[in-house]
Image (tube, grey):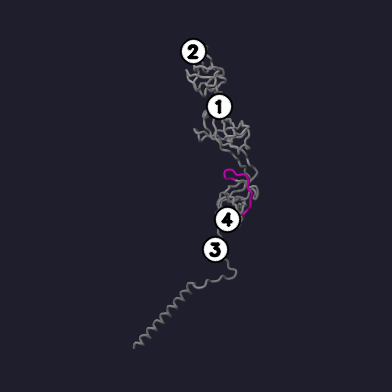
């Protein structure tokens, strides 16, 4: 009896295994399991080619304006320090700081008298017409012939003196234009022109001094003011320009990408020229009117498909 029960159990287990095996095979067949279906000859993948969004710029011959940033100080075009012809005490001050004077007007009187010796007062006159810009003496002060008693300057006609580093001196010449900003009026541009260039380079600072006159008289400009100067120098013309970031460097060669009419790009080797404010000249490798990729080029390769999302996307190729 015991053997009969064991035999029945074996038969039941075998039946369960057969049913399970049949069910699993049917499930694989219905779900396409097993080996992948092979493509029939001539069948193509339905997956589209990757398309990269880019922005382009029409190649245009554009001049590059170079410039130098420097600083300077505003001073009268004409300014004279005044010294007495004799030593003594300041007996009389005929002017005050800011007084307007004409050439020959009295500035101070000096008493050259000493104990036991009485002399007439010695007058000191202004050598030019202008404004008293410094008056470092007071009544009763003892002065000598080496003591400056006043400075007279023409504050109606001001100039700006600035220093330019030695590496830029080859670009300096008369007539260069500049935009000047002042601390008191930082949003205002004052126009000036170079009227003098020093013939020597300062051996200590390694700079050359340039003098600029303001193109227009403006009461907001005062002598003694500190100025920031944007001095326009050379103009580089005759070449297509492109943002410097759009130029790719590979194996010591430089490339850009050109957008083709079929919305692909071609890698083009170029040579570059002068660069100003992250814009560089392309001296060869591109023609005016072609579309150059200026954004999105880092992920491109020769022949890549692109979608031009720039404003000029419908312009000429």
The residues bearing labels 3 and 1 have C-alpha atoms spaced at a distance of 76 Å
In this rendering, the label closer to the viewer, 1 or 2: 2
> In the image, which residues are magenta?
267-279
The residue under the point 58% across, 66% down is: 44
Q: Quadrant of residue 302?
A: bottom right
The residues bearing labels 1 and 2 have C-alpha atoms spaced at a distance of 42 Å
Whole-percent x, y for residue 123 in the image: 53, 15
The residues bearing labels 3 and 2 have C-alpha atoms spaced at a distance of 113 Å
The residues bearing labels 2 and 4 have C-alpha atoms spaced at a distance of 96 Å
In this rendering, the label closer to the viewer, 2 or 4: 2
Q: Which tag, 1 or 2, sits closer to the chain's start? A: 1
Whole-percent x, y for residue 70 in the image: 56, 36
- Number of residues whose C-alpha sits closer than 10 Å to that of mark 2, classed few (under 14), some (14–19) or many (20 or more): few
The residues bearing labels 4 and 3 have C-alpha atoms spaced at a distance of 19 Å
In this rendering, the label closer to the viewer, 3 or 1: 1
* Numbered label attached to residue 47: 3
35 or 178: which is nearer to us?
178
């Amino acid at each position: 009896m015991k053997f009969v029960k064991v035999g029945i159990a074996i038969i039941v287990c075998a039946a369960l295994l057969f049913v399970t095996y049949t069910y699993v095979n049917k499930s694989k067949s219905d779900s396409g399991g097993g080996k992948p279906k092979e493509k029939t000859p001539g069948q193509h993948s339905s997956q589209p080619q990757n398309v990269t969004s880019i922005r382009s710029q029409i190649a245009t011959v554009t001049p590059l304006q170079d410039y130098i940033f420097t600083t300077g100080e505003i001073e009268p075009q004409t300014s004279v320090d005044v010294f007495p012809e004799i030593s003594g005490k300041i007996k009389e001050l005929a002017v005050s700081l800011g007084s307007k004077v004409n050439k020959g007007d009295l500035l101070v009187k000096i008493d050259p008298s000493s104990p036991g010796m009485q002399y007439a007062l010695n007058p000191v006159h202004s050598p030019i017409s202008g404004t008293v810009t410094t008056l470092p003496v007071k009544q009763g002060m003892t002065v000598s012939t080496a003591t400056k008693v006043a400075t007279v300057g023409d504050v109606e006609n001001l100039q700006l003196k600035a220093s330019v580093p030695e590496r830029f001196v080859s670009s300096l010449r008369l007539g260069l234009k500049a935009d000047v900003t002042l601390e008191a009026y930082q949003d205002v541009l004052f126009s000036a022109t170079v009227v003098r260039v020093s013939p020597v380079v300062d051996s200590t600072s390694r700079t050359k001094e340039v003098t600029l006159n303001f193109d227009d008289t403006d009461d907001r400009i005062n002598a003694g003011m500190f100025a920031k100067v944007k001095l326009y120098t050379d103009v580089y013309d005759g070449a297509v320009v492109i943002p410097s970031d759009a130029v790719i460097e590979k194996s010591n060669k430089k490339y850009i990408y050109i957008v083709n009419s079929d919305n692909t790009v071609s890698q083009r080797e170029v040579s570059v020229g002068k660069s100003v404010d992250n814009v560089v000249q392309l001296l060869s490798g591109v023609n005016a009117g072609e579309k150059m990729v200026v954004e999105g080029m880092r992920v491109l390769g020769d022949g890549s498909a692109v979608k031009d999302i720039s404003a000029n996307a419908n312009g000429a190729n």
